Image: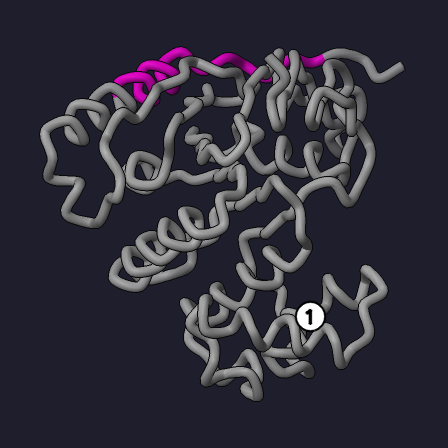
Amino acid sequence: MIYKLEVRHVKKTFATRQEGEIVTALQDVSLSIRDGEFVSIVGPSGCGKSTLLDMIAGLSVPDDGDILLNGTSIVSEKGHVSYMPQKDSLFPWRTILDNVIVPLQVQGVRKKEARQEALALLPDFGLEQFADHYPFMLSGGMRQRASFLRTYLQKKDVMLLDEPFASLDALTRMKMQEWLMKMWQTFQHAVLLVTHSVDEALLLSDRIYVFSPRPGRVLTEISVDIPRPRAARTSADPSFTSLKKELLHWLEDGISHEAPVRKKQIP
């Protein structure tokens, strides 16, 4: 089977500031995403989740292994996927409209045409009243919506989301999760989400990969066979509770068997 996105036996190490020490961030990581599928990665801090997204986006290169899009290697190549980092990274001197059109301008679209295209999408993202606002004038949730629209306008079939709701309060986070589900069902991108929240992963995902502590490895893959559409109340469903227990078991067991940092001399 040719997957939309596939990571094969990826390994990544980093040299620390201490001379002669190498930290293994990821070890033999393999995962896959089908077209239009929503997949999440959960794991403890420092297990290499964000590092993996950086490599998929071409911002860094694995030491070993391969990353394929539609069966073709994209290692070290940028521009194949949409990537939304943890912070919204909106330019404070640009209005929301002019912030979201940045990907179109990078693609060579004239500013007037880019604005027209973005204006047509503002209602879908709940931003129609905020086109002329500046980022400091918006709530955290609204800035995240703008960041999502900017990510969408990169026009890639695969969207990488790195803890997009981590900085939001609980109520706003819940609303944004439900909003994201609606957007995903509308546009049907393949999504790879990194999150620390088990509840968030279960609410949003078709499948979940559980990572071990550093060096990050795939401990297990769990299918979320909970009917859609889902909402916050889905967390009270017995099947949700059962899957949550299973996920927490894997996370707790992985932490209790944390592997030490491997050291060797840098050649």
How many labels, in total? 1
Q: Which residue is mark 1?
A: 101
Residue at x 47%, y 33% (from the top left corner): 37
Crowd tier of the residue under label 1, counting other residues whose Cα lies within 10 Å: few below 14, some 14–19, many 20 or above: many
Question: Residue 111: image x %, image y %?
Answer: 78, 78
Q: Does 92 sit left or right of 148 as displayed?
A: right
Residue at x 65%, y 19% (from the top left corner): 24
Question: Residue 129: image x %, image y %?
Answer: 45, 85
The quadrant in which residue 88 appears is: bottom right
Question: Residue 249: image x %, image y %?
Answer: 26, 18
Position above or below: 198 against 212: below
The C terminus - image quarter: top right
Q: Which of the two residues, 78 or 60, is positioned nearer the viewer here?
A: 78
Amino acid under label 1? Ile
The magenta-colored residue range is 249-263
Residue at x 29%, y 60% (from the top left corner): 175
Residue at x 17%, y 40% (from the top left corner): 235
Position above or below: 29 against 107: above
Kind of element beneath mark 1: loop
Question: Residue 224: image x %, image y %?
Answer: 30, 26
Q: Which of the two residues, 40 or 169, is positioned nearer the viewer here?
A: 40
Q: Does 192 sit left or right of 66 as displayed?
A: left
Q: How is the image coloured?
A: one colour
The quadrant in which residue 1 appears is: top right
Position above or below: 138 against 89: below
